Image (cartoon, coloured by chain):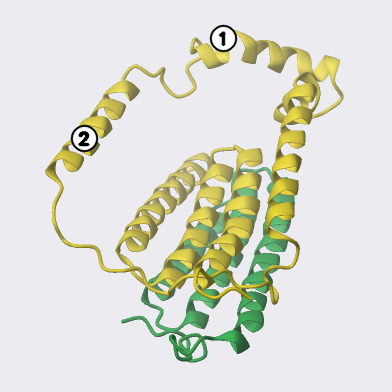
Amino acid sequence: MTEGHSTLSAMVFVDLSLLTMLFLVAIAMLRSRHLFAVVMLSGIYSLLSAAFFVSLDAVDVAFTEAAVGAGISTVLMLAGMLLTSRREKPVMPGRAPIAMAVVFITGAALIYATIDMPAFGDANAPANAYVGKQYVERTPNEIAVPNIVTAVLASYRGFDTLGEVLVVFTAGLAVILLLGFGSARGGREVSDQEDE
Amino acid sequence: MSMFAVATVAIVIAMALALVRAFAGPSLYDRVLAGNSFGTKTVILIGVMGFLTGRPDFLDIALLYALINFAATIAILRFFSYRQPKRTPAEPSSAATGGSDD
């Protein structure tokens, strides 16, 4: 077995096992009624998908997934979980045939839609033919940023990114104004009955 | 190169083992530890994957993941240390004993 083959098969192995683990974690999250376990599993799910994004070369998405999914949202879920009970109420085991049918039909339609997608790495695919090609050709000359994704986000679409940052900042500010700083430590618990 | 391939397989197996602990529990701290060690495995996997594909630049990403993982674990544990004394009698010490699952 040559080096290239061994690298390729190792990467295929990594991708397959990451996807398998994602699937298992999702099933376990669905089946568990212990909310803390679900929160920890969702953190693991984010880490797994971040690793999968890195293996797909989507490094910026992986960054976001790791910071938001594994970091912040785990803590937020814990904060929410501690205000409620630790166990989910058991769901009645009744079946919902209409919902099941809708899910299956939607899934089948989505899978059918993927047949029309261009093949992986196809040079004539729309994603590679028009704007993307221009970015790839121009970025080394126009902008002194080695990573093309970074160049697109921070320079070509700089105003767009600035607007996004503004929106996220405003949203965070509003949440802080509503909830207050430091509610994790000794913040007043919210309850409907007692009025302190 | 095949050395890195073997290391990758070993790390994936270790990830699966940490996953088993996260599924099985039973106590709260088992799950925190499983999540933390799973994060560490992710960091190592990304680092090794970078060397496997001949792009050691991935090491920077792995470092950032290590930071995030560390901060997240500290945040989770601090959360429980803050909340512990204020436990209501309706849920007797389910966090203190680790909230055994089923």
Residue B17 in view: no
Same chain, labels 1 and 2: yes
x 47%, y 90%: residue: B89
Q: From what the image shows, is residue B70 above or below residue A123? A: below
x 76%, y 63%: residue: A181
Q: Which mark is residue A102?
A: 2
What is the crowding at mark 1: few (fewer than 14 residues within 10 Å), some, or many (at least 20)? few
Q: Chain of mark 1?
A: A
What hue represents chain A?
yellow
Q: Which mark is residue A129?
A: 1
**Residue B41, percent from left and from top:** 57, 64
Q: Chain of mark 2?
A: A
Residue B54 sits in quarter: top right
**Residue B84, percent from left and from top:** 60, 86
Separation of residues labelled 1 and 2 (CA atoms): 36 Å
Front residue (pair A139, A82): A82
In the structure shown, which secondary structural element does the residue marked by tag 2 occupy?
helix
> Identity of the amino acid at label 1?
Ala
Dot placed on the residue nearer the N-terminal end, 1 or 2: 2
- Nearest to the eye among marks 1 and 2: give it: 2
Q: Point out the image quarter for the N terminus of chain A.
A: top left
Residue B94 sits in quarter: bottom left
What hue represents chain B?
green
Q: Point out the image quarter for the C terminus of chain A.
A: bottom right
**Residue A79, percent from left and from top:** 58, 67
x 53%, y 72%: residue: A82
**Residue B14, percent from left and from top:** 48, 69
Residue B63 in view: yes
Q: From what the image shows, is residue A158 above or below residue A42? A: above
